[in-house]
Image: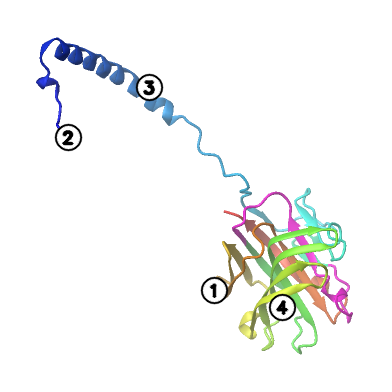
Amino acid sequence: MPQCSLKASRGPKGKLVVGLSVIVLVIVLWFWPQATRSASVLPAASVPAGTHGPYSTNFPRAENPISEHGKWSNGQADGLDWANVQTIPGLAFGTEIGGIRPEPQNYDDSTALLTGTWGPNQTVEATVHSVNPNMTDTVWEEVEIRLRSSLSPHKATGYEIMFRCSKIAKAYCNIARWEGPLGKFTYLKNSGGSQYGVKEGDVVKASMIGNVITVYINGVQMVQTTDDTFKTGNPGMGFFIDRATGVNRDFGFTRFMATDR
């Protein structure tokens, strides 16, 4: 393509082009600073719809079930067939009856999910409380992280990451998908051994980014799997007790954080 310059312009048309060019140049120089100033004060881009952002708590009040001003839904209060999560200052724990019960009643895990609209990429981190852990493989005490989960009457869906509160050889960290009705779930990943159990003060973490679920204990990646079933839902927590009663406060969470960013 040939190049064109003002110097090459000749005759009446050339003069007109030169004159118009000068006028345009003056206008641009006059308005450019104002345009750049205006652009600099434009509001920052808003957060994409559906992005909730981080929520954290150390459970400062006593509530049964946990609410924190409407921030939580609960297994019995909202799902009917599961148990609620209760708090005392500094601790969240389950309210399951426990003991020896038939299926599916014994799978009524204490469950609490954060309310509101959450984006699909979720991360939950929590600090474990565990005292008097069972060392004989006769009692099951679990702390649980929930991702992309939902609760409604007689229906619970989403992903559960469970940690046994014991460091015995039969400790575990498993990932399961809740399918809806009480007791209907599918294991996606089973990992057993003392290294997968948790103790007092351990920090557990799980994230779901896209279809990948990744699990950590004290910052070390322990388990990973993939699943494409549930695209949306809310983060939360849960607790499970089997073959023991009256020990619900022996295990739980002292701190909880969730984010979808």
Q: In this view, does 255 lie to the left or right of 69?
A: left
Q: Which amino acid does the dot numbered 2 rest on?
A: Met
Q: Distance between the residues labelled 1 and 4?
A: 17 Å
- Give the mark, 1 or 2, whose residue is nearer the N terminus: 2
Tell me the quarter of the picture where residue 243 sits: bottom right
Q: Which amino acid does the dot numbered 4 rest on?
A: Cys
* Residue for badge 3: 34
* Residue for badge 1: 220
Image location of residue 171, percent across then percent down: 68, 83
What stretch of residues is rendered in magenta? 95-123
- In the rendered structure, find residue 165 and report the number of the disc placed on it: 4
Q: Which amino acid does the dot numbered 3 rest on?
A: Gln
Q: Nearer the viewer, residue 40 or 153?
A: 153
* Residue for badge 2: 1
Residue 169 among magenta residues: no
Q: Nearer the viewer, residue 101 or 135?
A: 101
Between label 3 and label 4, give the one nearer the viewer.
Answer: 3
Q: Which amino acid does the dot numbered 1 rest on?
A: Val
